[in-house]
Structure formats: C-alpha cells, structure tokens
Amino acid sequence: MIAILGAGKMGEALMSGLLGSGTDPSTVLITEPRDDHAAQISAKYGVEAVPADVAVTRADTVILAVKPQSMSALLREVAPLVRDDQLLVSIAAGISTESVERHLSTAGRKAAVVRAMPNTPALVGQGMTAIAGGTHALEEHLDQARRLLETVGEVVRVAESSMDAVTALSGSGPAYFYLMVESMVDAGVLEGLPRDTAERLVVQTISGAAAMLRESGDDAVVLRRNVTSPAGTTAAALRELERSGFRSAVASAIEAARNRGHQLSRE
C-alpha cells in the first residue's frame, strides 16, 4: 500500500504516474486537508482519501508531498505511527533526510528515508528527479524509490550534499526555461510578429532544440556552434547575450536558488 500525504500538483503527478504504470488504485491512499479537493481527487482516480494517521498506519511506502513549511507539523503528527519497516520518500524542497529522521527519532522510529527532488514536468511524465538516501536507507530502499519515481520521468542518484544544487538546477530549472520563452515571445512581438505566431515559433524551436540535444549525441557547445555561422545573425545575437552577462546571470540565479534551498533546510 502506498500513501501520498499531500495531493497538490506534485503529489497528484506522482499518483497519476503510478496509476498510469499499472498500479492498482485500491493500493493507493491520499491525504488532503481540503475536503472538496480530496473528494475530487478520489473520484477522478478511484483512490481512497483518508486522514494522515490512517494512511501512515495502513501503508508500506509513505510519500511526504506537503509543502516544506508544513513538513514539521505533519511529521509531529505521524511520527509515532511510523514503523521501522516502512519507506518514507520526501519530495519537499530543502528538507533533509536528517530533519525527517530527527522527527522520527523523537518517537523512537528508525524507518528508511529517501529524499527526492522532482520537477514539474513530472506532471506530463517528463520529470527529472534526483534521490538520496538517509541513514537507514539501504540499496533496496533506493531502488524502490527509483522505480516509484520513474513512473513520472528520469531518476538519478546523488549525494545528499548535492541536493541544494539539484534543486537549483533541475527543480527550479523549468521556471528559468519559461522565463526565457516568455522573453523570446515578447521580443518577437516587438519585432512585429503576432503573439500566437511568436509563441508557436518559440515553443517548437526550443522543443526541437531539446530533442536534438537529447538524440544527436552532441553536447550543447557543438550544437550551438553548428547554428552559428561566422559574422551571421546568430553570432550577432550571441555577442549581445555575452555583453549582457547572460552566463553570469544564469550562474548567479542558480547560486541564489541553491542558497535559498540551504536556508530552507536550516529552517
């Protein structure tokens, strides 16, 4: 039995991925404090909505999918009910395995904890998730978490010390991408293109570029050079991006996100 504590966007994405991979809805439990949303999710997916204490008592695997700010309160509620033979998978940004284990230890529990950092493309089955194991997580627990999360995309294992960097790079990464798309569309409109045309051009251009990056076997440097003719339009555009500090702005943004993740873990 799998319990998903928190039926927000990411919790629902994981549930949808599990069910899409063949998991029986009768083996999935959800918790959601908003009664109307709980009823909606239950009706849509055929899963049972129950209180958190009931879900933890009945489940073998517990996915902690609440917001970081709500994690401490949730763990205080359910820690006494956790069994040492359970697997807990936390997908809350900035919450370390040590933090989860500390709450469990106050109740005398030593369950396996795996920290995971998925991103929002998991909503369409194209997520990227990094996982790291806690003190009591064995290889079998990490494999179990990997199989679960592969239902919504790709999974990579990292050291937990790298999780803040992962959060900054791939967890927050889609937002950087969307800002880039937004900026390119606005620039196209300024150049006289209708907005719907500019959006179509940009989305397909970036989608195609991503496909080439994945499928060609070439890295980004090679592919960029292939587009850049000497003294051509692309070279002129890239020169302006470099003059504007594009690379340093990206690096600074990722550093800021990493620092905020580290701050969240301390809070």
Image: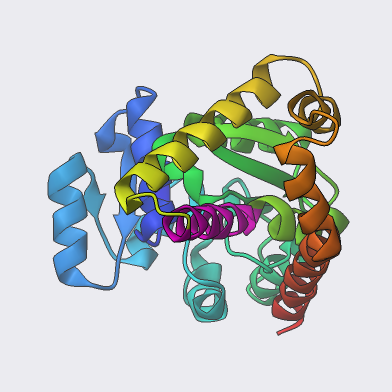
| Vertical side of 150 occupied by 67: above or below | below
Specify whether residue 12 is in view: yes
Residue in the picture at 56% in, 50% down? 119
The quarter of the picture where the N terminus appears is: top left
Residue in the picture at 85% in, 62% down? 243
| Vertical side of 57 occupied by 1: above or below | above
Q: Nearer the viewer, residue 37 or 138?
A: 37
Image quadrant of residue 150?
A: top right
Inspect the magenta stretch and tell me whether residue 179 lies in it. yes
Query: Which is the main secondary structure of the residues drawn in magenta?
Result: helix
Which region is colored magenta? 171-190
Name the outermost residue toward the bottom.
267
20 left or right of 172 in image:
left
Q: Indicate how the structure is coloured in the image.
A: rainbow
Q: Nearer the viewer, residue 58 or 22?
A: 22
Q: Nearer the viewer, residue 259 or 142?
A: 259
Q: Position of residue 206 (x, y in %)?
A: 55, 37
Specify whether residue 57 is in view: no
Q: Position of residue 239 (x, y in %)?
A: 82, 51
Image quadrant of residue 223?
A: top right
248 left or right of 47 in image:
right
Q: How many marks?
A: 0
Residue in the picture at 75% in, 80% down? 263
Inspect the magenta stretch and tell me whether residue 251 lies in it. no
The quarter of the picture where the C terminus appears is: bottom right
Q: Position of residue 38 (x, y in %)?
A: 21, 61
Residue in the picture at 39% in, 62% down? 6
Q: Position of residue 251 (x, y in %)?
A: 83, 62
